[in-house]
Image (tube, rainbow, N blue to C red):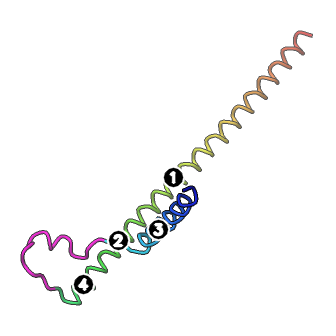
Amino acid sequence: MHIDNILLKNENEGLCKTVKTEKDRRKCGKPLFNDLTINDDNKAIFFSPSKIAQRRQEIEQEQQNKQEIKREKAEKRLQKALRKEEREVLNAQRKAVAVEKKKLAAEKRLKKEA
């Protein structure tokens, strides 16, 4: 009984791995002419090779635009982080100068009192 359970579990794990790899292999993509097929559901639609090539180029251009937008956003985040770091460095410098001024002022007061 115990051995049967172990064998079934191993078989189940193997089948799960197989299903997962099969799902990963399949490439799920959007249809090329999704917008055209919505209008005429019952009619046959024929596309020339030039239209298919053109649509593929449009899809590639859309993907490039999305990638460019992602790059721009990443660049903006990087610039923002750099500006923040510069502000922090400037603030630290200002605080150091203020502390130094306070020390000098305290020393002058001590000299005057002495």
The residue type indicated by label 1 comes to: Arg
Say above or below: 103 vs 73. above
Gap between marks 2 and 4, in whole Å?
18 Å
Residue 98 position in % (x across, y down): 72, 28
Q: Residue at x 44, y 70 (%)?
A: 24
In the rendered image, residue 59, in percent from the top left (x then y), is placed at 31, 74
Spatial distance from mark 1 to mark 2, Cα to Cα?
A: 31 Å
Q: Mark 4 — residue?
A: 52
Image-quadrant location for residue 20: bottom left
Residue occupied by mark 2: 28
Does the residue at mark 1 contact the one at mark 3 (Cβ under 8 Å)?
A: no
Which residue position is annotated with label 3? 15
Side of 101 relative to 67 (left or right): right
Q: Quadrant of residue 109?
A: top right
Identity of the residue drawn at 59% across and 50% down = 82
Bounds of the magenta span? Answer: 30-46
Q: Please give the count of numbered marks on the rendered protein.
A: 4
